Image (cartoon, rainbow, N blue to C red):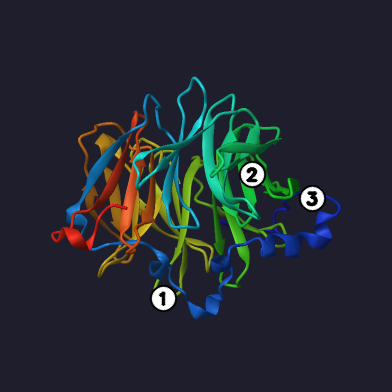
Amino acid sequence: MIENFAEKSSIVETNSSFKEASKKKVDDNFAAETREPFAEKEDTARKLPYFDILKRINYKERKSMEGHDVWTLAVFTSVKGKTYIATDGNQADHAVTIWDVEMKKIVGTFKGHTDTVCGFVEIKCDNRGQCLVSGSEDNTIRLWDVKKSVNVFSINVGYKVRVLCSFGACVAIGFRDSNIIQLWNITAKEKMGSLKGHSGGVFCLAVFTNKHGKSCLASGSDDGTIKIWDLVTISLICTLDNDLFTRVTALATYTDLQGTLWLISGNNNGRVELWDLNNETLKLVLAEDRGYYISSFALFLQHNRGVCLAYGDRNGTIKIWDLESRTCLNPLESANTIWVENVAVFSDKDGRAILVSCDGSTTVNIWEELIDNPPRYKMR
């Protein structure tokens, strides 16, 4: 069922000065790749890191988090090409820990949150270089200067942060205990507006560009629906509803070779669905309910197959789907038997994919392709 904005009103709160400046402020802060003309049908696959042969993938590193139980992670790359992994800290100090992938060591520990850290995103900061925003159940978001390892400032957002999503110098924030989504310009420390429409907490967010070239936000909620928002006009475009009333916990978007824009959704019972965003319809159920939630998705390219989807599964495995053929491939398996919580992917200097995963234990698995000729590829 698709609800149009004309059929069901959604209240949007904004600052009085924001209405005149909203289009310029949001659109100017979007990364250039999110504003590419849709008419060019730039497929997601051309931007994704790739694996050649999935059978050759295995976990090469198990990074010890030195007592940290890792439930949340994110990967980001510096302007000089260095790759870092950010992880949530132990429950005692609620720290954010930054790992240098190449040096295999901690390069920063950010302390300041007083409750569980639920997410972090990289943003563009003028004159500051590498910046990270973290969100916590202590009702705050914090901006960190990665190079200097200092907390630049914190903002009390009034609710328990569940998820963050970045676009340029801005972040969208979903909350566990509120049904609104807040939009903040971080560098200006200015709240740009609030999106209202969900009837439950917001657990996942994804930014994308629709077929009309508009910068959009997808949000998944405890109310079982997905809402699509226009980030320029700060208004609701549509609501996607499968009538299951099950919490939506993961979202990702990609464009296939035919130019179709797809939204992938995962829910609290492990169901994975494919939505055609061009027509705002549910097209396919990839995986039925399996009794456990999906926390995140990762996308990568497999040679001669197209775009593939990865997410955590039971018994320490990562499930892999070929999105072009809609077939489930052989899973990635480790010695762990714990349910994989979060996955993320990044590329090495040659464009090859490296997958990272965490399972709530004190280690993070790093997965990469095993190459027969070692000089061709080394983990950076």
Q: Residue 160 in the image: x percent, y percent?
A: 62, 31
Between label 1 and label 2, give the one nearer the viewer: 1
| Mark 3 or 1, nearer chain start | 3
Q: Rounded to the nearest whole Å, what is the CA distance between mark 1 and mark 2?
A: 32 Å
Q: Secondary structure at mark 2?
A: loop
Name the residue nearer the viewer: 188 or 273.
188
| Left or right: 297 in relation to 145 | left
Q: Which residue is mark 3?
A: 14
Kindly tell me whether residue 200 is visible in this rendering: no
Q: Which residue is mark 1?
A: 258
Q: Which image quadrant: the N terminus?
A: bottom right
Q: Which residue is mark 2?
A: 198
Q: Secondary structure at mark 3?
A: loop
| Left or right: 47 in relation to 374 | right
Q: Are marks 1 and 2 in contact (CB under 8 Å)?
A: no
Residue farthest to the right, as pictured: 16
Between label 3 and label 1, give the one nearer the viewer: 3
Taking the spot 65% from the left edge, 35% from the top edge, the residue there is 178
